[in-house]
Image: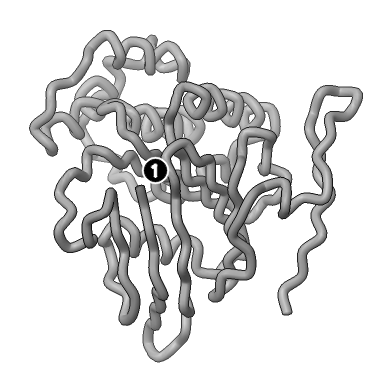
Amino acid sequence: MIQVENLSFFQNGKKILEDISLKVEKGDFLAIIGPNGGGKTTLIKCLLGFIKPQKGKIYLWGKELSNFKDWHLIGYVPQRAGKDLNPMFPLTLREFLHLPALLYKKNLDENYLKELLEIFGLTELLERRITSFSFGQLQRAYIARALVLKPEVLILDEPSVGLDFISQKNFYEILSNFHQKGLTIILVTHETWLLTKEVNKVACLNQRLYFHGAHEDFCIFSEKDLAGFYFHKIEHTHW
């Protein structure tokens, strides 16, 4: 579905990404991990065509990025979605969730929209302006909007930053349910504890790609503790 070949990106003479190659297959739950400033968000922006790398190629569904037109196939939630939202932004949640259908000129499945509202606990907020939402409510609204056209790939950039532990746990359970129904997910995070049993691929990025492969090869073992939480032992070194 997504293929990156020998991608490099520089900004103001500074190396951000160097010779990155990776693939995302249908049904993957890929976690892109690495330290802050390691280039994770830059890689996502390259994949989505927001910025242009100085070197390398990107293919989406077998087409070069410049020839790809079916952007409705990708749902995207940026890092700290809504943090720069203008307090005068007038849209209600209902109007906000209809934006992708208007942008891509696609029909919206109202029954599916209702299902998303229930899943993310937003049903009672449908007629409220999104500028009145709490951070957690706004985050869920952006994720619901990313899913509203039933994309084949969902890309999330640090989606749980700012959420408490229980909210994070519930959120990743919801993600796992979507993945089990066939959604391909790319999750950007610097928190290795979020590598749940649903994650089947890991890409470790810090300017260069230090690891790209199966989750079980990245973690020595993954076990469930007495409280029902999974924990992992990771043996991984950047040379």
Colouring method of the image: one colour
Amino acid at the residue labelled 1: Val
Determine whether, in the image, residue 46 is placed left or right of residue 36. Answer: left
**How packed is label 1: few (under 14 Cα within 10 Å), some, or many (20 or more)?**
many
Residue 86: give x, y in percent of width and height: 28, 45
Quadrant of the drawing holding the C terminus: bottom right
> Is residue 108 positioned above or below 230 on the image?
above
- Residue extending furthest toward the right: 226
Residue 22: give x, y in percent of width and height: 47, 61
Under tag 1, what secondary structure? strand
Label 1 belongs to which residue? 77
Residue 153: give x, y in percent of width and height: 37, 39
Q: How many marks?
A: 1
Q: Say which of 111 and 36 sits in front.
A: 111
Q: Residue at x 14, y 58 (%)?
A: 67
- Where on the picture, by quarter, is residue 131? top left
> Is residue 225 positioned above or below 189 on the image?
above
- Where on the picture, by quarter, is residue 12? bottom left
- Residue extending furthest toward the left: 105
Q: Residue at x 12, y 28 (%)?
A: 106
Q: Residue at x 77, y 70 (%)?
A: 237
Q: Say which of 89 and 74 sits in front.
A: 74
Determine whether, in the image, residue 167 is placed left or right of residue 111. Answer: right
Residue 213: give x, y in percent of width and height: 61, 55
Determine whether, in the image, residue 164 is placed left or right of residue 51. Answer: right
